[in-house]
Amino acid sequence: MKKFLPKTTKSSLTTLPLTLLISCSTSTKNTTHPYTSFENYTDPLASNFIQSDDRFKSCLWNHQWQCEFTNSPKEKEGYFETIHNLENGSRDRIKACGLNGTIDQRIKDCATSNKKLSHFESQKLKITWKLVSVIKANQQYEVWIDTATNLLWSDRTDKKYNWYRATGYAKNKDQSILETQFIAEPGYRDNETPYKVGIALQPKNPISVCHDHKELTKVTPYQYKQSDEAHDSNERYAFKGYLENERVQWKVPSRIDWMIAETHGIRKVLPRIDYKMWSTTSGSDYRNSVWLYDGKFGVFDGSDRQISQYVRCIGKRNDIQ
């Protein structure tokens, strides 16, 4: 710990959140990191609007523990909704945008259509999130980009999926047992002891929620099919902003992806974030263990892979190498 932490007093360290200490202890460039300045600490992800609003002064140190305040936005009770500066408390005012074109063209269209609702900036961390697309189908789906990493974040899926279907993992019986403890051979219903899952973890034609199923068909022995999130016969996904493989390479986020996004303020930006969502990162206690990100509190939890959870995808732009 001493190797990485800047000089400070014991008393000031005890007041810091655990996630803050972790950020410091794992950074090798703490001389320039904004978290190294512990004196007069304020939330680096809070906007100037919030810091200047008297309703929130008592909340700035403890915002993730559901600090109460007046005129709380209904869909974000428990922490700050900074995207629309707490006006009316609804994302419905965000207009549809970014429906076609390149990534940059979509960002520009959303900025023109939605003005201040199209971005979130943290001046202390020098991080900006920008709206890439908004699709209003059976509900509103938003895709955002973290400009610090140039990675896109999809909306949350409408349905829950087990880890195998979320990530597109499918292998023969022996290999999947070796790697994940359970049988993920497509169409295989595991009724064997000691686990007796009783369901096919992957259907006969495997599912991949994030990674493009057509690409997986090319590199595996299996014929993948689109997930239930597809909104039309053209295999377009509204929760991904209709941004398919030719523009974005999607995958399930790793635990590191979630940790970076958390420090960049993802919970202040993305809609439908108050849920547990999959990561690709395995736990170390047993082979079926995998990490979940809890978007309500910004923490991690362990889970078994066969359990169904929501999915959120992270995407790499194909137009940037």
Image (spheres, rainbow, N blue to C red):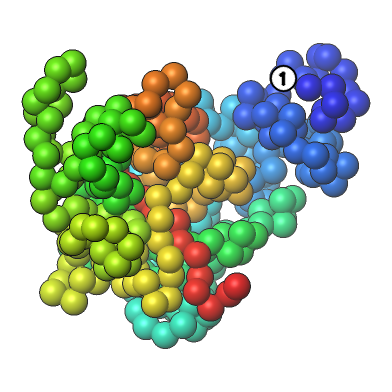
Residue 97: name its quadrant: bottom left
Decide which of 97, 69 is in the foreground and name it. Answer: 97
Question: Is residue 219 in sight in this rendering?
Answer: yes
Report the residue at 43% width, 76% height from top: 247
Query: Residue 142: horizontal and vertical position, in percent?
Result: 37, 62
Decide which of 83, 259 is in the foreground and name it. Answer: 259
Q: Quadrant of the C terminus?
A: bottom right
Say if 280 sits above or below 107 in the image: above
Query: Residue 27: horizontal and vertical position, in percent?
Result: 75, 38
Query: Residue 311: horizontal and vertical position, in percent?
Result: 32, 47
Q: Is residue 83 left or right of residue 11?
A: left
| Residue under label 1 | 15
Q: Residues within 10 Å of mark 1 (few under 14, many from 20)?
A: few
Say if 239 sits above or below 86 in the image: below
Decide which of 211, 171 is in the foreground and name it. Answer: 171
Looking at this view, name the residue that lies furthest to the front. 174
How many marks do you count on the picture? 1
Decide which of 8, 45 is in the foreground and name it. Answer: 8
Looking at this view, name the residue that lies furthest to the right. 7
Query: Residue 236: horizontal and vertical position, in percent?
Result: 24, 71
Q: Is residue 235 left or right of residue 74?
A: left
Report the residue at 70% width, 27% height from top: 21
Secondary element at image label 1: loop
Q: Quadrant of the N terminus?
A: top right
Question: Is residue 69 in sight in this rendering?
Answer: no
Amino acid type of disc 1?
Answer: Thr
Report the residue at 59% width, 37% height from top: 56
Say if 31 sits above or below 114 in the image: above
Say if 314 sits above or below 308 in the image: below
Report the residue at 67% width, 46% height from top: 52
